[in-house]
Image (cartoon, rainbow, N blue to C red):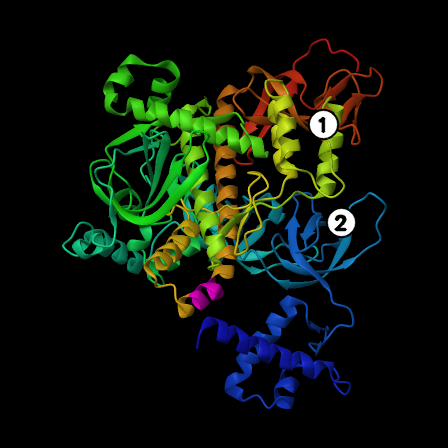
């Protein structure tokens, strides 16, 4: 029985239960009574219980306080509870544009990430809709990472995730030898209630809070990211690696294009080890012949293997500051799959022909065998292209002409993308340097250059070309979708930038990406450039993986997918399988049905895994930046106000670190927050703080454990606004 048939059978069983409860003669019954009425055999009682729980989670049935099940007259509102350290929370409801606000007194004991049923409360015009939690349907966080504190007869865990909101009581016999300062994983055994803390047991001790590496490990565990591979997956990886270049390759190579004589390079960061893309370029007869060659990971990672299951569970490699958690074991990711210079590698190549205007006039997608000639780095290529560095030019003399042609083609591709309205975010990024024990010693600016841009342009073009090809073939596929922003958020953005002296034209129904492009161009080079860029990004929807090709708003393109990074992203690996089967003629009716069955689930899981990885990477950067600023307490900086709330000013420093100036510490007056104007104004002096404004601040306090940085405004003359 296929997965689709199993799902259909389960749905039929659930429909049967719902239909029974909708009958006029039905009165709410307990599980045991239902089992008798439906003549469920004793050995099938657990299955009935599971189906009832599933229906509860879907909101299709309810259970009263006496444990009796019934179909509600009105379908309940069900969502995910998002906790806040101050006790209140929000509920994310699928299909609703805005989260529901849950006051602290109305949370019903819900914890962060619980699935809850809510009742909508009265709301005021222009205010966020309020709700009350009436039922907790499923607990979200069953394990919590935190810091252990020991008392004489018990202990408790302070969660790292402040959204959980409450400390966890640990009985003495369940502390597992943890001591004060231990970073631990605690399993929650009782979620507590009004006036009673949750209770749990120590499941794992990660180390002491000050031990090197424990800080990042805590983030990994807290986000639920798998950091070890099963013995079965490791064994499969070793076996796959051993097959590289073996006699069995001869048959494989007979089905591939041999591109080993084509001049080819990789261009990556200096520290990169998992090299999954190489590029080649020839200028011939007035045309560019661009090759984007991607590691054929699908040759080594077979569908339904232990290795594939773990790759899907991870969804993506996670790049933390000073640590990488790969999607695949290193023997593959840094070894036989990585396009290391001077070694034969299996690849999937997108060979494109472009005219002198940068338009793709022809293309071929083909399995190939390649041999990279040289491993280049972004700094080396930028030195050649931007500064004509004689040493670098001499060292890579053979490739200099090709690199210059690549830069010329990149400019053409980028200009065409710009003309159609693509939104290009160019935030000032930073690189955090660590010592041998993982302590931050320097934060350096990391700007885009010609080298990073040309690789980005070539990868985007290959992704678009592959997506368009398979869209018109109408085969099952995974696309990278970025939906049009909500009009309400665009109106709020337009209102905000108007206060900064910028204008936006909004259409009746939706904004065109070109309008956002114009806004960012107007702000380029101004003090508020970074601020406007980040606010614009926050106003847009999050890109995700889907089985429908509905376009990419940010790129202003109709077709887009992720094809170019199968070593570190599962969707790329998944579509490589589809591409190869289609090219070889193996994508028959049965395989098409198989992909139609699994791809929705793959899209959902990988989108969720991507968000999890993003959260971990953000937390790791915040942690290391806070740890770095601990060494600079008392020092002054000129920053830019990047956010204003009722509790204070957020200020971004030149090194991209952000800290908070609490409203109570603002000197010289009593300050009030004007939400409409998004400014902080003194009630007597009229002194005003606005977004994008430059401001001198001093570091008052930094705490890596709470990941908070407190700033104070340096005393200076301030004009009334």
Magenta region: 592-598
Q: Position of residue 278 (x, y in %)?
A: 32, 37
Q: Disc 1 vs disc 2: which is toward the camera?
A: 1
Q: Check the image and report above or below for 410 versus 313.
A: above
Q: Examine the structure image and report whether residue 457 is included in the region drawn in magenta.
A: no
Query: Residue 707 vs residue 573: left or right?
Result: right
Q: Is residue 71 left or right of residue 548?
A: right
- Which residue is painted at 24% across and 20% down in the image? 395
Judge by depth and name the residue closer to the eye, 341 or 605: 341
- The image quarter in which residue 370 lies: top left
| Lower position in the chain sequence, tag 1 or tag 2 | 2
Q: Looking at the picture, how far across and down is residue 544, in whole percent?
A: 54, 48
Secondary structure at badge 2 equals: loop
Residue at figure coordinates x 46%, y 28% from the top left:
412
* Quadrant of the image containing the N terminus: bottom left
Q: How many marks?
A: 2
Q: CA distance from mark 1 to mark 2?
A: 31 Å
Residue that numbered label 2 is attached to: 103
Q: Is residue 422 visible?
A: no
> Is disc 1 placed on a helix, strand or loop?
helix
User: Between residues 311 and 112, which one lies in front from this camera angle?
Assistant: 311
Residue 537 in view = yes
Q: Which mark is residue 497?
A: 1
Q: Residues within 10 Å of mark 1 (few under 14, many from 20)?
A: some
> Which residue is drawn at the image coordinates 52% and 73% (left, top)?
7
Classed neighbour count for the residue bearing mark 2: other residues with Cα under 10 Å, few (<14), some (14–19), many (≥20): some
Please tell me whether residue 596 belongs to the stretch shown in magenta.
yes
């Amino acid at each position: 029985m296929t997965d689709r048939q199993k799902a259909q059978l389960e749905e039929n069983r659930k429909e049967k239960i719902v239909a029974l409860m909708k009958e006029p003669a039905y009165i709410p019954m307990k599980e045991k009574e239902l089992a008798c009425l439906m003549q469920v055999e004793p050995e099938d009682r657990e299955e009935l219980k599971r189906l009832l729980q599933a229906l509860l989670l879907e909101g299709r049935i309810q259970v009263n306080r006496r444990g009796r099940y019934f179909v509600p007259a009105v379908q309940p509102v069900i969502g995910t509870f998002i906790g806040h350290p101050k006790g209140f929370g929000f509920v994310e409801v699928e299909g609703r544009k805005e989260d529901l606000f849950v006051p602290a007194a109305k949370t019903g004991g819900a914890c962060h990430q619980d699935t809850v049923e809510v009742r909508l409360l009265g709301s005021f015009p222009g205010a966020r809709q309020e709700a009350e939690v009436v039922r907790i349907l499923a607990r979200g966080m069953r394990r919590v990472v935190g810091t252990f504190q020991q008392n004489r007869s018990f202990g408790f865990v302070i969660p790292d995730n402040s959204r959980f909101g409450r400390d966890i009581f640990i009985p003495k016999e369940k502390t597992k030898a943890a001591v004060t300062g231990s970073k631990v994983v605690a399993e929650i055994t009782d979620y507590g209630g009004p006036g009673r803390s949750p209770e749990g047991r120590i499941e794992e001790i990660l180390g002491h809070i000050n031990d090197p590496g424990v800080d990042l490990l805590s983030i990994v565990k807290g986000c639920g990211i798998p950091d070890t591979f099963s013995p079965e997956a490791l064994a499969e990886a070793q076996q796959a690696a051993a097959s590289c270049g073996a006699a069995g390759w001869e048959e494989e190579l007979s089905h591939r294009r041999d591109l080993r004589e084509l001049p080819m390079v990789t261009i990556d960061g200096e520290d990169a080890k998992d090299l999954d893309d190489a590029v080649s370029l020839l200028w011939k007869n007035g045309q560019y012949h661009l090759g984007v060659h991607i590691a054929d990971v699908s040759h080594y990672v077979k569908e339904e293997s232990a290795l594939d299951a773990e790759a899907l569970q991870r969804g993506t490699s996670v790049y933390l500051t000073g640590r990488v958690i790969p999607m695949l074991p290193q023997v593959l990711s840094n070894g036989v799959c990585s396009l290391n210079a001077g070694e034969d590698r299996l690849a999937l190549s997108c060979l494109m022909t472009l005219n002198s205007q940068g338009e793709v006039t022809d293309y071929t997608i083909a399995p190939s065998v390649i041999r990279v000639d040289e491993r280049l780095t972004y700094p080396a290529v930028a030195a050649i292209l931007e500064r004509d560095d004689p040493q670098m030019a001499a060292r890579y003399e053979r490739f200099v002409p090709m690199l210059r042609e690549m830069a010329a083609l990149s400019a053409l591709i980028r200009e065409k993308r710009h003309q159609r309205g693509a939104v290009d975010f160019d935030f000032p990024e930073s690189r955090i340097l660590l010592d041998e024990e993982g302590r931050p010693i320097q934060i350096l600016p990391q700007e885009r250059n010609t080298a990073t841009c040309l690789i980005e342009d070539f990868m985007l073009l290959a992704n678009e070309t592959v997506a368009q090809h398979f869209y018109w073939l109408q085969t099952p596929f995974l696309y990278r979708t970025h939906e049009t922003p909500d009009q309400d958020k665009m109106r709020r953005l337009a209102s905000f930038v108007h206060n900064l002296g910028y204008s936006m034209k909004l259409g009746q129904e939706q904004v065109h990406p070109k309008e956002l492009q114009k806004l960012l161009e107007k702000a380029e080079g101004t003090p508020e450039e970074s601020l406007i860029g980040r606010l614009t990004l926050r106003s847009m929807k999050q890109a995700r993986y889907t089985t429908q090709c509905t376009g990419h708003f940010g790129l202003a393109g109709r077709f887009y997918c992720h094809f170019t990074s199968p070593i570190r992203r599962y969707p790329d690996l998944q579509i490589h399988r589809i591409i190869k089967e289609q090219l070889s003629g193996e994508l028959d009716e049965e395989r098409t049905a198989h992909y139609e069955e699994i791809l929705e689930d793959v899209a959902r899981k990988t989108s969720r895994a991507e968000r999890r990885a993003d959260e971990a990477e953000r937390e790791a950067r915040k942690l290391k930046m806070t740890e770095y600023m601990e060494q600079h307490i008392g020092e002054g900086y000129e920053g830019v106000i990047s956010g204003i709330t009722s509790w204070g000013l957020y200020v971004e420093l030149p090194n991209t670190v952000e800290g908070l100036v609490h409203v109570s510490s603002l000197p010289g007056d009593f300050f009030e927050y004007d939400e409409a104007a998004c400014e902080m104004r003194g009630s007597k002096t009229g002194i005003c703080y606005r977004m994008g404004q430059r401001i001198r601040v001093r570091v008052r306090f930094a705490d890596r454990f709470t990941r908070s940085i407190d700033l104070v405004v340096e005393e200076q003359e301030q004009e009334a606004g």
